[in-house]
Amino acid sequence: MPTKHLPSHPSLAQLKHQAKDLMKARRAGDIAALQRIREFHPRFNRRSDGEIGRAEFVLADAQLTIAREYGYANWPRLKTRIEEEQDRARESQAPHHDRIQDPIFRHAVGLLDAGDIDGLRRHVQEHPALVHQQVIFEGGNYFRNPALLEFVAENPVRHGKLPANIVEVTRAILEAGAKTEKNAIDSALGLVCSGRVPRECGVQIRLIDLLCDYGARAAGAVLPALVHGEFAAVEALHRRGAPPGLATAAAIGRLESARELISQAPPEERHIALALAAQFGQGEIVRLLLDAGEDPNRYNPLGIHSHSTPLHQAAWAGHHTVVELLVERGARKDIRDILFQGTPADWAEHAGHAGIAEFLQHT
């Protein structure tokens, strides 16, 4: 799920109160509190609500959860950043390339953005460690420790465009030594597959093929592509060896495939499938999953808009038939998302779907 953003003038005292409130909510069995802990506390990742509720959970645990919820590794890091409030506020508004402190790395990103292959090659020859280096960005939910290779995806969006020769630029970085950085290659593929700019610039599929040629794991990028509706990228990943699964069938609406796959799919994949089917309005697959026992009142899985429920996503996207189906099958209309504190009706209203908002408010 996305991280929260600190207010322009954050208060450490207020954050301490949030940690204490989280402890109280966990003791009360509040499902939103349990989801936040599962999402952000590494010790409770993939634990059930019952396991989280029974486990020892002290103030330090609550503070760690709050810190990570705001995009910081731990409470001391969050505290330090608040104490540097003014500098941090200015920094957080700047694009990522302007936040790079290392001038050598920053110049490399500038050459990449300009499509200056010759200049980039010379720069890397002078500073060969560049292709193995990572920079640190805090205050966000992804792109926290990118290598130079990961900047080729323009995801997060920095300029809104890519140089026409970005595929050749990417190959140059790989051949300069990044081809040994398997994690960076996999990460770059996920960013390319889930970003709109590579698609809009007509280079998404070519970048996918290039990165897969250098060993990127196609299967690992399918889910990010699905979540962001980048279905052409999904097809390219399947062509490059990623096995089709229930999640793809659910998002794209392949009902017969979903029927064949559901009996063998593990619980986690069914949970993902319900989230995606609701997000993309695949009503018959939503019905299939509900008939198979999926709970419409669970928060979506980690990485799949996990601050919300299937009903939130269906309402936001304007899928009236799916909204009606979920409500008919017991989806609660009063559950609030854990980022904005909105109900599904609030989401529908904010998205301009007045009919869905009225339905949720008056049924």
Image (tube, rainbow, N blue to C red):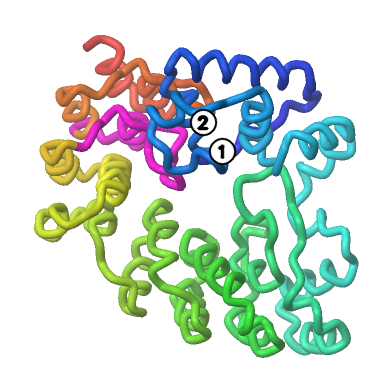
Residues 161 and 178: in front is 178
Look at the image and say whether residue 269 sits in the magenta stretch: no
Residue sitting at 27 percent across and 59 percent down?
A: 248
Residue sitting at 42 percent across and 30 percent down?
A: 351
Residue carrying label 1: 40
Residue 128 in the image: state x and y as whole percent: 81, 84
Residue 22 in the image: state x and y as whole percent: 57, 20
Residue carrying label 2: 36
Label 1, residues with CA under 10 Å away: few <14, some 14-19, many ≥20: many
Residues 218 and 354: in front is 218
Asked if the residues shown at circle 2 and circle 1 are in contact, with their CB atoms under 8 angstroms apart, the answer is yes
Q: Total label count?
A: 2
The secondary structure type at the circle numbered 1 is: helix
Examine the residues drawn in magenta and state their main secondary structure: loop
Q: Quadrant of residue 259?
A: bottom left
Residue 304 in the image: state x and y as whole percent: 41, 45
Residue 162 in the image: state x and y as whole percent: 62, 69
The magenta segment is 294-321
Above or below: residue 1 compared with residue 201: above
User: What kind of residue is marked 1?
Assistant: Phe
